[in-house]
Amino acid sequence: MMSIVRHLQITGRVQGVGFRYAMQRKASELDITGWVRNRHDGSVEAMIQGRPAAVETMTAWAKHGPSGAAVGDVRTAEASGEFSVFLALPTA
């Protein structure tokens, strides 16, 4: 299976709305691995790995997030790494 890795930086009202846990559920649906965490600056950061179509779907989902979120921007960058599960990590 060919997989790609992307780093996402998500800004807006994205903390305190269940963003990390909703992303974890979506990752499970899409067979995505990696991690997501809140940042001290109020943003959410994620590394996602999976089939290109799944990564694109997850990136599109991140642009609106769960109900209650008000996403301002999603910055994406190519990244590298190898992940076996998708984790919601503590704030960094």
Image (spheres, rainbow, N blue to C red):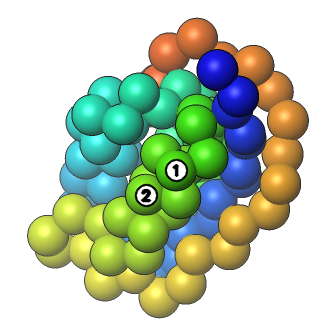
Q: Residues within 10 Å of mark 1 (few under 14, many from 20)?
A: few
- Quarter that holds the N terminus: top right
Instruction: Kindly tell me whether residue 3 is visible in this rendering.
Output: yes
- Residue at point 60% right, 54% down? 45
Nearer to me, 88 or 48: 48
Say whether residue 7 is left or right of residue 37.
right
**SS under mark 2:** helix
Q: Residues within 10 Å of mark 2 (few under 14, many from 20)?
A: some
Nearer to me, 11 or 48: 48
Q: Dividing the picture into quarters, in which one does residue 77 lie?
A: bottom right
Instruction: Kindly tell me whether residue 62 is visible in this rendering.
Output: no
Q: Position of residue 20 (x, y in %)?
A: 36, 46
- Residue at point 48% right, 32% down? 32
Distance of label 2 from label 1 (alpha carbons): 6 Å
Count of numbered tags? 2
Q: What amino acid is at disc 2?
A: Thr
Per the image, the residue denoted by label 2 is 57
- Quarter that holds the C terminus: top right
Q: Do the CB atoms of the residues marked 2 and 1 lie less than 8 Å apart? A: yes
With respect to residue 30, does 65 lie above or below? below
Q: Position of residue 79 (x, y in %)?
A: 84, 45
With respect to residue 59, does 3 lie above or below? above
